[in-house]
Image (cartoon, coloured by chain):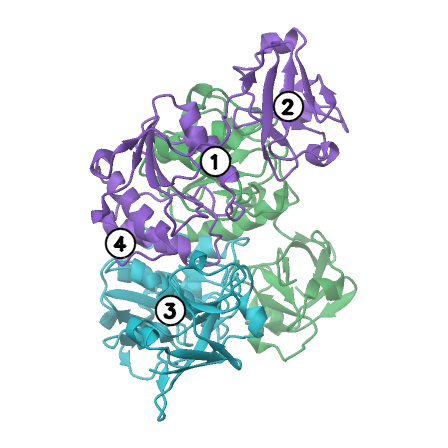
Chain colours: A purple, B cyan, C green
């Protein structure tokens, strides 16, 4: 489960109660309920960072849903032998980018929905019961038809420019101020780094790449480091790189020498 | 589990360890541990909002217990085929109001208690072990005798006044400032609303009733909307209705034309 | 699971996903993920307070790990028929003090580690998979050899001074400002209290010992009370004893008349 509901109210528990009512043996795991309210990109990042640790057959129930009650679609993504259930607003965007064989279904079969359907709480009344029946073995084909036009955020993959450079971006800023880029070791291999690849962000050149934080020198201003989600992060030893750079999510990162 | 223990300390885990020691297969679900300290009414509201999502056989372990160590009774409520275990201080009040067939037992059989019983942590030493044996099939009759005088908060049901009006009240104010009343669709049917029912709170007249938040016009000052817990909420589009009204929990809401 | 990861990010979920991938039937219980960042002593206290509520066979996965990526060892402690898995930095120190038959293993068998091993997230890549295989029945002997020199914090047990006094200390200050000492009822028996044992802390004499908080008189300045973790706490009725005493963790508490 991944939501922006927080943990003070009864919302998360209501979803869990609905799942267990249908499927008493479900294993319920919280990814986070503290996604900033309605922050679809933060949910998308958290999900793409977490899902590789889960096994085949896992159902991800993701409810960050500013459009609840409107006409936005409800979808299931089947990718990497896992299922992802939630609103069609881009939260599964990075999963779809990562998994070329991803298949997306619009949920149209209302027979499993909880009745009456609240206008304000589809997490409990639509998404939780759908997740429960998927976990119990119902095929996504029984819940709706495939679609080919899910809402997508900006692509997760950096863009190869005509001049040979790579245009990446900051996709997440964590609580320490580290700026997570969308560069992976496929984009920026050890060979390219050894050959002198350079990274530019907010007009600053970054040439140092570290294996882990403690490897950086004390007070080292800005360096790249591979984060545990598999992305290159721009960090500063004992300081917030985001503050230092005045960086925001979405800012461009350019790499030359690749 | 529903408590005011927070999540920083070992308290919740200690209760879970005790339950699992007795009943290793228990499914443990957190409703919330962030009830404001000792706020019995907040716990009562959260519980009545959550329990309809849970199935028959669920045991609710609720520990908001300002009187721990004193002579307040420990009780089990059996209602809606679920059990509710905790101190007798009103936390189960709304459940008892909602479920006319509710049966209340005082816990007097000490044989299942954890020894030694801490004076300050009955959640771990009394309520958790009792919840565990109930989950394993022990009958409430084996734990104590029925009582007919549990501590009750103000009734959950609005009062019909002699002049035909309905006197309701604000039972909860959520984190967005929405004022949750104790009016349900049984009290204020679509027919009554269509016929022009009016609602007064803090000297203000409210005539607009919306199906969901996004249906209200931008900046619409005050309107009624059905919340996901089944109660009418007084809301303001993009603002805190509670601040606008200077409303507090317990404030009277009067409905005429019913 | 006990960590300082917080609940906003994907870190805790990643560990759980890894455990469930290896061991789908594991019961996963959170002790807390809100240990102050890198606060080894807070983790050690929380663990020693929680573990007696858990049954034989429990695996405690504890990741408060300022030295991640460095050469600090990874260990398993086998004590009280439970296992404790985490970095060798003192977090299991109080468990080892409490359980004389504790046996400590260094984790050297890399065959169960998740690949590739992140330099920054051993919780997911080393400790979680080891916890999972222990839960599935793998013997600690298969994971590495015993060691006799685990990192230890100051001893959990008070020191008997030559003059007959007992030198204890404050091992934890809780969110109410209660100062938890390392004195247990073995150190300060009811008989000794009845015979007039006195406690000194920060130059103040404390002679009153209460069974529970409500037993103290309103505004009673400073008194001792037995907390639910089995330790004597220095408390003040309706005030923060820590503020009143300007006390910090580690401050000495002396007991005479013992």
Work out whether mark 1 precedes mark 2 in sequence or the reverse, and give the earlier one.
Answer: 1
Pointers 4 and 2 in contact (C-beta within 8 Å): no
The answer for which chain carries disc 1 is: A
Tag 4 secondary structure: loop
Q: Is residue B24 visible?
A: no
Which one is nearer the viewer's eye here, B6 or B192?
B192
Horizontal side of A156 relative to A206 (left or right) equals left
Which one is nearer the viewer's eye here, C96 or A242?
A242
Question: At which x and y percent is residue B220?
Answer: 51, 64
Which one is nearer the viewer's eye here, B230 or B98?
B230
In this picture, is C159 found above or below A171? below
The answer for which chain carries disc 4 is: A
In space, the residues marked 4 and 2 are separated at their CA atoms by 45 Å
Dividing the picture into quadrants, the one containing residue B257 is bottom left
Work out whether mark 1 precedes mark 4 in sequence or the reverse, and give the earlier one.
Answer: 1
The quadrant the N terminus of chain A occupies is: top left
Q: Residue furthest right?
A: C203
Question: At which x and y percent is residue B72?
Answer: 43, 78
Residue marked by disc 4: A114
Q: Residues within 10 Å of mark 1 (few under 14, many from 20)?
A: many
Which one is nearer the viewer's eye here, A212 or B251?
B251
Residue marked by disc 3: B231
Q: Residue furthest bottom?
A: B162
Pointers 3 and 1 in contact (C-beta within 8 Å): no
Residue marked by disc 1: A44
Residue marked by disc 2: A253
Pointers 4 and 3 in contact (C-beta within 8 Å): no
Work out whether mark 4 precedes mark 2 in sequence or the reverse, and give the earlier one.
Answer: 4
Q: Residues within 10 Å of mark 2 (few under 14, many from 20)?
A: many
């Amino acid at each position: 489960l991944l939501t922006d509901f927080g943990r003070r109210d009864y919302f998360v528990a209501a979803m869990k109660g609905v799942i267990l009512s249908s499927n008493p043996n479900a294993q319920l795991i919280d990814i986070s309920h503290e996604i900033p309210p309605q922050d679809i990109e933060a949910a998308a990042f958290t999900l793409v960072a977490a899902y590789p640790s889960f096994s085949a057959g896992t159902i991800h129930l993701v409810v960050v849903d500013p459009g609840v009650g409107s006409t936005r679609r409800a979808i299931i993504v089947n990718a990497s032998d896992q299922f992802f259930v939630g609103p069609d607003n881009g939260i599964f965007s990075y999963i779809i980018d990562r998994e070329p064989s991803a298949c997306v279904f619009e949920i149209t079969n209302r027979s499993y929905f909880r009745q009456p359907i609240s206008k304000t709480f589809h997490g409990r009344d639509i998404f939780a019961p759908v997740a429960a029946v998927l976990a119990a073995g119902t095929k996504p084909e029984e819940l709706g038809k495939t679609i080919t036009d899910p809402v997508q955020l900006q692509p997760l993959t950096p863009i190869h420019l005509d001049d040979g450079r790579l245009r990446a971006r900051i996709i997440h800023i964590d609580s320490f101020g580290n700026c997570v880029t969308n560069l992976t070791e496929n984009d920026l291999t050890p060979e390219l780094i050894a050959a002198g690849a350079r990274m530019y962000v907010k007009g600053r050149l970054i040439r140092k790449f570290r294996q882990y934080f403690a490897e950086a020198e004390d007070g080292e201003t800005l360096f790249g480091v591979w984060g545990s989600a598999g992305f290159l992060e721009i960090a500063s030893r004992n300081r917030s790189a985001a503050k230092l750079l005045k960086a925001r999510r979405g800012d461009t990162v350019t790499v030359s020498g690749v």
